[in-house]
């Protein structure tokens, strides 16, 4: 199952006994122990698990490095077109296990470690989960990097090396508590600092009119301060390829280690302060998912990594080209949401101010280079910056944006004279008492391609959020339905299921997930179905053990595992799932002998620290759990668990253990979702609305293998337009009334009737996320789930069909589409046969 790359690493230039990067169990063992001693400087009798983790990681890294260097060298030499994925977030998850798999070393390394009497899984667990992202958007970037490398596509990821990633979540008294995530406290073996490739980034100050050497007017930016951007490269290996692409993350530092002037003048404190100020820029990830932060530091972060990355790309280009005339033929830059949208203005500034291109030529290069992915339909989530804040940080960019806007709106006026509404909606500036810069509009104007992340989302972008741009440039709009990597999300997290699949159909499904369809042929094989069910059962038992250890709650692995893990958001409607739990609870209270399917409700997810309602939803889940879990009438039939600190590592435990995947957002609000794909690939059934990629998942799985409920996006829209009165649903539906009243009565809050008012009151007054409309359809659909689950054989068949039919949702498919339709890049073979890392000749 674990095929290796041995044939590709045999290096004629290195004799076997010299081969410190050999792939045999013996060589690996020696390298592991050498690293422990010589790198960690520790003896086996003294070594901690963390020492073993580092020694193992360096052993793996050694085996990545020559591929990595050869990959970069090949791109340079062959001057191929390269994709640059610009993203403020990369939610990579742990590297060690994934890198072992992609290198084909997983099973061997397990053997090495176990031969030494150590626990492999325990060592893997030592790695801090690098949480440089909030949720789906950052995880998408990570899946894309895996697919790019696995498809041998030339690519670089560019982002920020946050010193503190997404906070660590603890639950105290049912409430979320945030703990700083100091993930770099110990050595990070997966990054290579490249201080010699540092660049400077300017901020603040003002602009002045001046003249160039020919007396032509030009603008100069006199910045207030200069920051050093230091790159750290994390090698990203593809699955069974030699391609190892860089993820280049920038760390902010003071441009002089000490401000010597201030230092010499006796202002030691001021010098140190400046150093600290500079380092603040890459200090911490803003923990907001789907809501803009609106803080100056956030804009500084965005500009910081975009400016550094563009300089880097230009420097690389100018090594082989006399000028930037063909820049767009060698570089395709993808903007992951509007976070890097300042790239439009920065690339224009570089071309016009620094490289003296005339405006039209610079604009042509800029548009041909950039492409923009939109991730949200919710207007409140679109980034807009106050002009005053913007100009204090980026005065020259403000001028450039005004110039772009002026020229753009001139064109619009000639195309659509007298359409004032159109013009004001297209404008890069929102005219308010406080003017705002619309980053989505900037991204649209400056890009040659604009895409949504699922079919419905892309349609709604054209019909609603970006309709004016779609009217101007219909040919710029694309859909690129998201995907996830089957390597991390099946092979690594569900080892046994992957083995079973490979046993039946071979391992080509890992590179071409459409091949998974072949397991449908085994659906009539009772032995196959038993094994399928047993693997799910084992995954559930493993999760149950984790829950007992971490939450001190005993759950029954034979109960239906009903799971909702994702960021906590009103639009994702975790509180709708809670209403269902309470409905079941009330049924039991009314008739303690009622025949009810045993269920374990598992929640997980972080709330933005400033998002009060989301935090209160966490408290509600825990409060309901506390009552339900210990009520003797329930007799253990219902359990409610909130697993703290949902992250990639926890996801790897949870998705494979789910029976039911909750994808219950208000239709039209979830752009795509990717958790929905991970669940289904691992054989969970989905209960969901017609939202985001759920629609396509249902199409692929077949409507008979999907529990559908709720309003369509269109119906949500018309209902809101007509005027929606949620109180009527409450008045008319007795069971719903019982549920809401149960909460309002203080039953889950020790008699406190006010605690959950901020959740309940809006439901009854305006209910913007339409919970009460969808409530009955949801509960009915859940009753069907219970029915279906009682027939375990039928359920297993549906589970197999779901997993078998998720080929479309491999991020390999998504990336192939981007490569062909938007980036125009092609695979590049990396030949390491005659590459001599040690230069021994
Ligand atoms: C996949 C994933 C997400 C996205 O989940 P959705 O259900 O699509 O919102 C968020 N966080 C983590 C850690 C993930 O792995």
Image: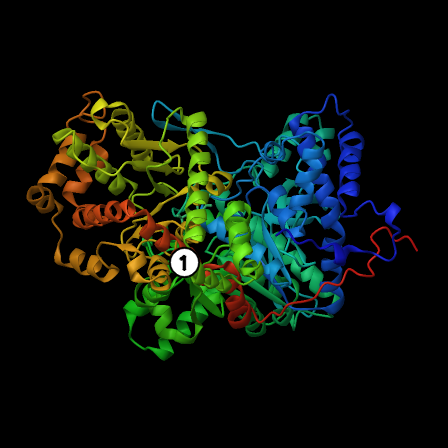
Residue 82, position in %: x, y?
A: 63, 64
> Measured along the vertical axis of the image, is residue 289 above or below residue 469?
above
Instruction: Name the foreground residue: 359 vs 301.
Output: 301
> Measured along the vertical axis of the image, is residue 831 above or below residue 62?
below
Residue 386, position in %: x, y?
A: 41, 49
Instruction: Name the foreground residue: 209 vs 729.
Output: 729
Residue 48, position in %: x, y?
A: 67, 25
Tell whether 831 sits left or right of 239: right
Q: Residue at x 77, y 55 (%)?
A: 9
Instruction: Name the foreground residue: 352 vs 495.
Output: 495
Tell whether 772 sits left or right of 660: left
> Measured along the vertical axis of the image, is residue 205 above or below residue 346?
above
- Residue identified by numbered label 1: 523
User: On the rendered image, what quadrant is the C terminus found in?
Assistant: bottom right
Q: Can residue 595 be seen by looking at this rendering?
A: yes
Q: Residue at x 23, y 62 (%)?
A: 714
Q: Residue at x 68, y 67 (%)?
A: 828
């Amino acid at each position: 199952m674990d095929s290796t790359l041995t044939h590709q690493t045999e290096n004629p230039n290195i004799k076997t006994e010299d081969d410190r990067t050999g792939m045999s169990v013996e060589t690996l063992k020696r390298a592991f122990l050498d690293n422990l001693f010589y790198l960690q400087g520790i003896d086996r009798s003294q070594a901690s698990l963390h020492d073993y983790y580092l020694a193992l990681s360096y052993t793996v890294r050694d085996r990545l490095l020559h591929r990595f260097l050869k990959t970069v060298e090949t791109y340079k030499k062959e001057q191929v077109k390269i994709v640059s994925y610009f993203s403020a977030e990369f939610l990579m998850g742990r590297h060690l296990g994934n890198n072992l798999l992609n290198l084909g070393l997983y099973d061997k390394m397990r053997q090495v470690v176990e031969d030494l009497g150590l626990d492999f899984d325990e060592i893997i667990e030592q790695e801090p989960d690098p949480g440089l992202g909030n949720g789906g958007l950052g995880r998408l970037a990570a899946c894309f990097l895996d697919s790019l490398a696995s498809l041998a596509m030339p690519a670089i990821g560019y982002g920020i090396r946050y010193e503190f990633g997404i906070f660590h979540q603890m639950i105290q008294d049912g409430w979320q508590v945030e703990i700083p995530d100091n993930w770099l406290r110990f050595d990070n073996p997966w990054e290579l600092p490249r201080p010699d490739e540092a660049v400077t980034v300017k901020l603040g100050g003002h602009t002045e009119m001046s003249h160039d050497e020919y007396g032509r007017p030009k603008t100069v930016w006199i910045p207030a301060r200069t920051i050093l951007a230091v790159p750290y490269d994390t090698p990203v290996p593809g699955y069974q390829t030699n391609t190892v692409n860089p993820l280049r993350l920038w760390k902010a530092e003071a441009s002089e280690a000490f401000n010597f002037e201030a230092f010499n003048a006796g202002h030691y404190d001021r010098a140190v302060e400046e150093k600290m100020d500079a380092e603040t820029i890459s200090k911490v990830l803003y923990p907001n998912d789907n809501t803009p932060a609106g803080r100056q530091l956030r804009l500084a972060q965005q500009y910081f990594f975009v400016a550094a990355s563009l300089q880097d790309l230009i420097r690389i280009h100018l090594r082989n080209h006399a000028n930037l005339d063909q820049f767009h033929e060698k570089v395709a830059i993808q903007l992951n949401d509007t976070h890097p949208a300042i790239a439009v203005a920065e690339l224009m500034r570089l071309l016009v101010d620094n490289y003296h291109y005339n405006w039209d030529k610079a604009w042509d290069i800029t548009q041909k280079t950039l492409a923009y992915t939109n991730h949200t339909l919710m207007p409140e989530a679109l980034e807009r910056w106050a002009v005053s804040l913007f100009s204090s940080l980026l005065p020259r960019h403000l001028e450039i944006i005004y110039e772009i806007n002026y020229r753009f709106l001139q064109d619009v006026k000639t195309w659509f004279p007298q359409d004032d509404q159109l013009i004001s909606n297209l404008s890069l500036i929102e005219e308010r008492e406080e003017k705002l810069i619309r980053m989505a509009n900037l991204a649209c104007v400056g890009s040659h391609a604009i895409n949504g992340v699922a079919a419905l989302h892309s349609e709604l972008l054209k019909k609603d959020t970006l309709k004016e741009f779609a009217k101007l440039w219909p040919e710029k709009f694309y859909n690129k339905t998201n995907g996830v990597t089957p390597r991390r999300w099946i092979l690594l997290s569900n080892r046994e299921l992957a083995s079973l699949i490979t046993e039946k159909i071979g391992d080509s499904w890992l590179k071409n997930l459409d091949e998974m369809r072949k397991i449908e042929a085994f659906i009539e094989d009772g032995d196959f179905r038993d094994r399928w069910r047993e693997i799910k059962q084992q995954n559930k038992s493993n999760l149950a053990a984790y829950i007992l250890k971490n939450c001190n709650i005993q759950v029954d692995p034979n109960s239906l595992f009903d799971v909702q893990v994702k960021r906590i958001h009103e639009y994702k409607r975790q509180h709708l799932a809670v209403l269902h739990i309470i409905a079941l609870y009330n049924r039991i209270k009314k008739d303690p002998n009622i025949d009810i399917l045993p269920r374990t409700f598992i929640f997980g997810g972080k709330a933005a620290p400033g998002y009060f309602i989301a935090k209160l939803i966490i408290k509600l889940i825990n409060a309901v759990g506390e009552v339900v879990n210990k009520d003797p009438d329930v007799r253990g039939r219902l359990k409610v668990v909130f697993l703290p600190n949902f992250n990639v590592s926890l996801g790897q435990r949870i998705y494979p253990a789910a029976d039911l995947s909750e994808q219950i957002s208000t239709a039209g609000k979830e752009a795509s979702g990717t958790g929905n794909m991970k669940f289904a690939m691992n054989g969970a059934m989905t209960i969901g609305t017609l939202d985001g990629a759920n629609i396509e998942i249902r199409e692929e799985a077949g409507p008979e293998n999907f529990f559908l409920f709720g309003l369509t996006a269109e119906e949500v829209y018309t209902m809101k337009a007509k005027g929606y009165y949620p109180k009527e649903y409450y008045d008319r539906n007795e069971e719903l009334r019982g549920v809401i009243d149960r909460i309002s009565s203080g039953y889950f809050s020790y008699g406190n009737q006010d605690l959950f008012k901020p959740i309940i009151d809006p439901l009854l007054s305006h209910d913007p996320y339409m919970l009460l409309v969808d409530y009955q359809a949801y509960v009915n659909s859940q009753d069907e789930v219970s029915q279906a689950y009682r027939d375990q054989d039928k359920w297993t068949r549906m589970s197999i069909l779901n997993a078998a039919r998720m080929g479309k949702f491999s991020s390999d498919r998504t990336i192939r589409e981007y490569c062909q339709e938007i980036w125009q890049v092609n695979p590049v073979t990396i030949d390491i046969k005659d590459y001599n890392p040690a230069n021994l000749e």
